Amino acid sequence: MKNQFSKKLAFTAIAAGLVITACNKSPYPGYELSDNGVYSKFYNQNAEGVKPKEGDVVRLKMSYKNSKDSVLFDSQKMNPNGNNYIEFPLGKPTFKGSFEDAVLMMSVGDSASFMISADSVYLKTFMAKELPPYIEKGSMLTFEAKLEKISGKAEVEQERNKKMEEQKVMTELRKNEEPKALANFLAESKITTKPTASGLYFIETTKGKGAKPGKGCIVKVNYTGRLLDGKIFDTSDEATAKQEGLFDERRPYQPIEFPIGMGQVIPGWDEGISLMSPGSKGRLIIPSSIGYGAQGGGPIPPFSTLVFDVELLSFEPAK
């Protein structure tokens, strides 16, 4: 009797294990399906560590790619804030198996890979109206993430105030240093061209032919933009973007088109391109007063003089 009971108990345990295994069966080799709907593969995991909760601010090094193995975001390369991590308040999961669900599984120091529905990420988390062309319907995104820090709201507020004070000091320093940096650049580059009244330096390297574009004309321009230290921050040339590690398959690499004098580009561009004829190539040295000013933008720090190598391909008369 006792032996039969033991066999029955063992059979029940095996059956239960098979049911659990079947429920957690993943179509993605190496990934496990968790109860919250996330397919995960942990490289490092501290099961006893403190995990974030909704409302905490999390700091992650992360990247994700589409089903064609194209990297769509990498915090160590494409973070607009210039950091090698991304930091954000952890919100309520936008769907079962979301990236928020994935982060809720992690402790500080954990690193993992997650497979998450691309449709749900774009349509529910990003709230896009439709899938972009580089996302295949029904496909999965692969997220690689390492959780570096968890902060409560009070701690984040204190740190934010500290950073704001530091930024104010740094901004003031950059404001005072910009004229010196520009003067050094002009001297080292042996540029003797005089600036226009606005402060723009225009050095034409190849003369164009014909009339120059006026206000409202639609111009077509190739360009590469650098900071004074030579670092490229943007370009219309695909080969240059790949060489500099800036390539982004989501954007087209082609000449930019815009109407002159309509405020669609920085003032230094409006002025500089209007000095060129079709076929003209040159360099625009644009101080921050006619560039991105005290705010900067993306990879461009506040009070930055910019250097653009430009080519005016053609223009259409104003309509």
Image (cartoon, grey):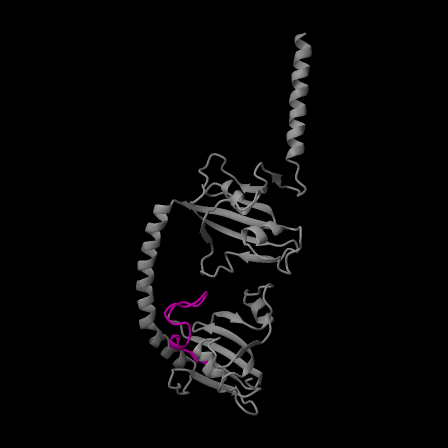
Magenta part of the protein: which range? 284-302
Q: Position of residue 25 (x, y in %)?
A: 66, 36
Where, quadrant-wise, is the C terminus in this rendering? bottom right
Determine which quarter of the picture holds residue 2: top right
Whether residue 257 is situated above or below residue 82 in the rendered picture: below
Q: In the image, what residue occupies the spot 61% across and 39% down? A: 32
Residue 21, percent from left and from top: 65, 32
Q: Residue at x 45, y 51 (%)?
A: 88
Quarter-of-image position of residue 301: bottom left
Q: Position of residue 207 (x, y in %)?
A: 54, 89
| Main secondary structure of the magenta stretch | loop
**Numbered label tally:** 0
State whether residue 309 is above or below residue 133.
below
Question: Left or right: where does residue 96 sit relative to residue 85?
Answer: right
Residue 108 horizontal/vertical position (percent) = 45, 43
| Residue sticking out furthest to the front | 319
In magenta segment, residue 192: no
| 80 lies above or below 112 | below
Instruction: Give whichever of 121, 41 is nearer the camera.
Output: 121
Q: Residue at x 37, y 86 (%)?
A: 197
Closest to the observer: 97 or 174?
A: 97
